[in-house]
Structure formats: structure tokens, C-alpha cells
Image (cartoon, rainbow, N blue to C red):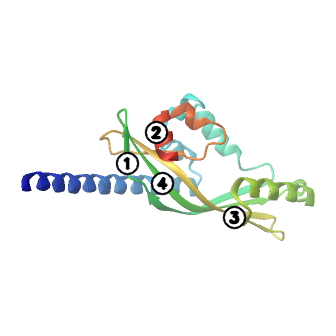
Amino acid sequence: MRTFFAALLGMALFSAGLHAQAEQQIREQLQAYFEATESKDWAAVTDLLYPPLFELVPKADMIQMFEDMEGNGMVFNMQDFKAQAISEVFRYEGEAFAKVDYIGRMSLQFTSEAMQTPEMTGMMKGNLEAQYGLDMVEHDPKSHTFTIKLNKSLLAVSPEGAGTWSFIEAEDSAGTLQQVLPAAVLRHFRG
């Protein structure tokens, strides 16, 4: 009987060690992802995205989309990203998955007069509040800047045993997650 409990304890300690190792790997690669996002290094960002995304949108098109977000009367910045929590790893069909809750800030400054009208400001404020929440959006009318407090989640994904992690946003308004992730994984993380 003692042998059974010793084996059980050994397995529990081994499992805890694997989780700690996976969490450390995720944190390191997530930091690189956050730094690339903050510095707008879109090639580095896409290198850290979950590769099946590129079956939906080619990598070059995604980089161009990121580059096109700025301009046309708008300047945006993303900063202060920080992981809040990393779930236990869920393994499915040769891949490991973990949910990462994180915070950050995004600012959108409108530099063209056409974007600074009260009508555009009101419309943009309503859209941002609907997307991020009423208490998450602040507007500075003097600088024509919206600041959004981000409180989001993403999924970290790694081929089983590889130790390299890629990322995909967990919010899925366009149905992207269902197209690239197994249903069992989505059910696991959505409860």
C-alpha cells in the first residue's frame, strides 16, 4: 500500500514539475509575443501565431493587415501587456493547450479632422464600449485619443513535447477558433 501512495505522490510531483516547465516556456514565448506586439514587429508577431491560422489568411496578408491598421488618420499603440494566469495544460491529439488570461492597454489616436468630428467620436466610443466594455474605454477629447484597458485571453498551443508555443486569441467573434481548433479543446476551455 505504501508503494502505491509513493508512486501516486511521485506522479503528482512529476505532473507539477511538467506544468511548471510548460508555464515557464509559455511565459518566455508570451513575453516575446507581447514585446513584438508593442513594438509593432508584425513579422515577429506572426511567427508566434498558431500556424493553422495561415490556412485561413496567408501570413503575408496578415502582416499587411497589421501594417494597414495604422494610417488613414489613426495612430495606435499597445503596451503594458502582462500575463495574469496560465491554466493547466490540456493535451489533445498530439498538441498541448493552455489558456492565458492577460491584461494590457491599447490607445487609438485620431489625427485626421474627419475622424475627430463629434459624430465619429460618438460612433467610435459606442463601438469600442460594445466590444471591450463600458468601464474599459476612456476618451481624451483634447488629444482625440481612446484608451482601452484590455482584459483578454488567448490560447497557447504546442506540439506535444516540443516546448515551443504559439498563440491564438481566445475571443472568437468571427468563428475562427472553430475553424482551426478541435471542438474538444474549445469545450475544455469554455467549460
Q: Which mark is residue 113?
A: none
> Which numbered mark, 2 or 3, is in the foreground of this view?
2
Q: Of marks 4 and 3, which one's residue comes earlier in the chain?
A: 4
The x, y position of residue 102, in whole percent, is 53, 59
Q: Residue at x 7, y 53 (%)?
A: 3
Q: Amino acid at mark 4?
A: Val
Dot 4: within a 10 Å radius of its alpha carbon, few (fewer than 14), some, or many (20 or more) residues? many
- Residue 185's label in the rendered image is 2
Please name the residue that numbered disc 4 is placed on: 100
Q: Earlier in the sequence, mark 2 or mark 1?
A: 1
First-in-chain label (1 vs 3): 1
* Residue type pointed to by label 3: Met
Mark 1 residue crowding within 10 angstroms, few (<14) / some (14–19) / many (20+): some
Q: Position of residue 40 (x, y in %)?
A: 59, 52
Q: Is residue 95 left or right of residue 117?
A: left
Q: Nearer the viewer, residue 134 or 67?
A: 134
The Cα atoms of the two marked residues, 1 and 4, are separated by 10 Å
| SS category of the residue bearing label 2 | helix
In space, the residues marked 4 and 2 are separated at their CA atoms by 14 Å
Gap in angstroms between the C-alphas marked 1 and 3:
29 Å
Q: Nearer the viewer, residue 95 or 5?
A: 5
Classify 10 Å Cα crowding around label 3: few (below 14), some (14-19), many (20 and above).
Answer: some
Residue 150 % position (x, y): 62, 60
Which mark, residue 136?
3
Cα–Cα gap, marks 4 and 3: 19 Å
Q: Are marks 2 and 1 in contact (CB under 8 Å)?
A: no
Q: Earlier in the sequence, mark 1 or mark 4?
A: 1
Which numbered mark, 4 or 2, is in the foreground of this view? 2
Mark number displayed over residue 89? 1
Q: Is 106 placed above or below 15 here?
A: below
Report the side of 86 relative to 34 (left or right).
left
